Each structure stands twice: as C-alpha cells, then as structure tokens.
Image: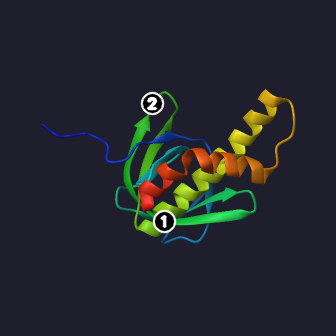
C-alpha cells in the first residue's frame, strides 16, 4: 500500500501566477490554488506532462517572485474541464521565494481584515510588525 502522506502542509491561497515552460519563451497566466514549502498547484487548460520544467512568477505588490519548478502531476478535473497541475520547487531558493510571497500576501490580507474590524486604517509597517510578531517563529522553523 502506498503512503500518500504529504511532506508539507498546503495553504489554500489564490494568487495570480505566470508560468513559462523552460523550452518556450511566452509566459502564460493562471491562479494558484494552494501553496506549500514544497510546491504549488493550479488549474490549467492543457495537460502538462510530469517532469516538465517551468519558470513560475508570483507578482506581489511591486515585486515579482520567480521560482524554478518541475511538474509532479496534471490530472483532469472533469467538473471544471481543466487540469489540476501540481509542481514541486526545484531548489530551496525557489521554495523560500514562494514562502516569502505567501507571507507578504498574508500580511496584506491581515491588514485588510484588521482595518475592517477596527474601522481605521493600519499602516503596512504596523500590519507587518503585528503579523511577524505572531508568525515569525513558525516561518523561521521552516527555513532555519
């Protein structure tokens, strides 16, 4: 019996991503479905063979986080008519960039929620300080 236990926890996060097959030069766009330290998944209109090398980019604020990845699976979702495609990051730098992009997005979302709850504006810096104070230890454990 095969052990299907995940090595990394996946965080559901929907962010725009840009992908380019290494052998091609035209970037194409999609949205991520979830992200983990080891990779991410997204829906794609076409089958992408396992082992295909991709260059991924996640735009966050005014930065573009670029990562190298390899397709792990591409499975047709009949209800959507798309292929759920999972990729694994090819190196620790790519994994770190993905995690950093995720943290920036989480801080932005946290700021928006706190502004709604408090009924007042919160600076990006204050939101980041609060977020980091609550989550820095978990982030450090991943890459420390």
Residue 38 x, y percent position in the rendering: 40, 54
Residue 30 seen in the figure: no
Give the quadrant of residue 61.
bottom right
Q: CA distance from mark 1 to mark 2?
A: 31 Å
Q: Label 1 neighbourhood size at 10 Å, few (<14), some (14-19), many (20+)?
A: many
Q: Label 2 neighbourhood size at 10 Å, few (<14), some (14-19), many (20+)?
A: few
**Is disc 1 in contact with disc 2, using a CB cutoff of under 8 Å?**
no
Q: Secondary structure at mark 1?
A: helix
**In the rendered image, the vertical position of residue 117 relative to residue 54, given as above or below:** above
Residue 27 x, y percent position in the rendering: 62, 63
Residue drawn at (40%, 66%) of the image: 90
Residue drawn at (86%, 30%) of the image: 119
For marks 1 and 2, the one nearer the N-term is 2
Viewer-nearest residue: 125 or 98: 125
Query: Residue 94 shows which numbered tag?
Result: 1
**In the rendered image, the vertical position of residue 79 relative to residue 121, given as above or below:** above
Question: Would you name the residue on which mark 2 appears?
Answer: 78
Viewer-nearest residue: 36 or 80: 36
Q: Secondary structure at mark 2?
A: loop
């Amino acid at each position: 019996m095969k052990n299907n236990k995940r090595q990394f926890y996946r965080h559901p996060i929907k962010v725009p991503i840009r992908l380019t097959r290494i052998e091609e030069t035209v970037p194409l766009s999609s949205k991520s479905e979830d992200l983990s330290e080891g990779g991410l998944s997204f829906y794609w209109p076409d089958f992408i063979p396992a082992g295909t090398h991709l260059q991924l980019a996640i735009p966050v604020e005014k930065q573009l986080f670029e990562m190298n990845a390899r397709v792990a699976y591409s499975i047709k979702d009949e209800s959507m008519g798309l292929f759920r495609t999972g990729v694994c990051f090819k190196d620790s730098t790519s994994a770190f960039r993905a995690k950093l992009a995720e943290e920036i997005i989480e801080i932005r979302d946290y700021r928006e929620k706190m502004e709604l709850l408090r009924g007042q504006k919160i600076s990006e810096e204050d939101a980041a300080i609060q977020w980091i104070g609550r989550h820095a230890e978990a982030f450090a454990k991943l890459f420390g």
